[in-house]
Image: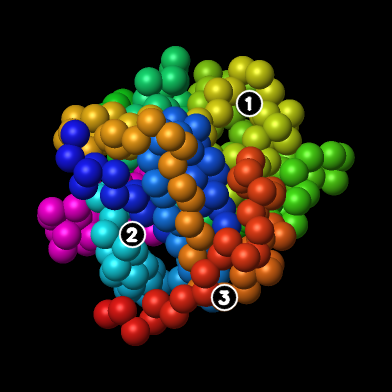
Amino acid sequence: MSSSNNRPIGLFDSGVGGLTVLNAVRKALPNENLIYLGDTARVPYGTKSSLSITRYAEQALKALLRYDIKALVIACNTASAVALDTLIAKYPELLVLGVVEPGAEAAVNMTKKGHIGVIATESTVNNQAYQKAILSRMPEAIVKSAACSLFVALAEEGWHDGELVDAIVKRSLSGLFDHYRHGEDMLDTLVLGCTHFPALKSSIANVVGDKVSLVDSAETSATQLKMQLSKTNLLSSEENAGRVRFLVTDGPSRFARVAKNFYSEAVDVDQIELIDIQHFG
C-alpha cells in the first residue's frame, strides 16, 4: 500500500460528543492515525441556524485539511444533517462521511415492525434528516422524533445513570412513547441521533425497556467508515497502533476533563492543541 494511506482521518464535532464516534473508530480501526477537532468555542450546534452550521462545518474541514487528511467523518448528527451534502459537493476528491446515513441504515435493518423513533437535538429533528434517510430505505416505515437537547448537558456533566437521570429521560421520552406503548404502533427501534446520547444508553434502555432496540450512530458510523476505506483502498498499512491528535477552539482544560465521559482513553490537557478556525472561510 502507498504511504499516502497512512495519512490521518479527520473527525469533527461541535464539542465533546463526537468523542463517542472517535472511540468507536479507534476500536474498529486501531492502526489508523486520527485527528479530532472539537469546535468548543461555538458549542452547541443543535440550536444554531442551518446557515451557521454549514459555515462552521466548512471551516472545520478546511482546518483539518492542513493536516493532509485522507477522509473526514462529521462526528456530529446536527452537522451531518445540515452540511454533509454541501461538503461532499465542494470537496469531491475527499471521502466525507456523516453519522446520519449509517444510523438510518442500521435502524432499517434492526426494526421488525417498521416503527422507528429518533431522538436528537432540535436542529437535527427540525431538519428531518433521519426521517428522510429512513423513509428513503423503507417508505412504509412510521418514524417519530423528539428533540432531547437536555441530554447533551447531562452527558457532558457525567450524569449518565441513576434515579434522577432516569426520571429526566422518562419525562423527555414520554411524548414519543406513551401514546404508542400499548398499541400496534409501539416503536420497536430508537435511534440515538446525537453523538452525546450513547453516554446515556443504559438509562435510556432502562426507560424504554428491552422490547425497544437502540441504534448507536457512533458504532454504525465506524463500521461504515471501515467499509468505505477498504472499498477505496485507503486502509492504513501500519501495523502499530495509530496516533490520536486533539484540536479544540476553546477550553482545552474543560475538554480534557469532560472527555472521560465519552472516550475510553485518558486525554491529557498537554495533548490538546488550541486553534482558531474562524478565519478559514
Q: Disc 1 marks which amino acid?
A: Arg
Q: CA distance from mark 1 to mark 2?
A: 31 Å
Label 2 secondary element:
helix
Give coordinates of residue 28: x percent, y percent: 44, 30
Q: Relative to residue 87, is residue 279 depicted above or below?
A: below
Q: Disc 2 marks which amino acid?
A: Val
> Magenta stretch mostly in which secondary structure?
helix
Label 3 environment density (alpha carbons within 10 Å; few <14, some 14–19, many ≥20): some
Residue placed most toward the observer, 58 or 70: 70
User: Which residue carries the number 2 mark?
Assistant: 82
* Number of numbered markers: 3
- N-terminal-most mark, 2 or 3: 2
Q: Is residue 79 magenta?
A: yes
User: Which residue carries the number 3 mark?
Assistant: 250
Which quadrant does the C terminus fall into?
Answer: bottom left
Q: Relative to residue 128, is residue 116 depicted above or below?
A: above
Q: Which residues are magenta?
A: 78-100
Q: Relative to residue 124, is residue 3 depicted above or below?
A: above
Label 1 environment density (alpha carbons within 10 Å; few <14, some 14–19, many ≥20): some
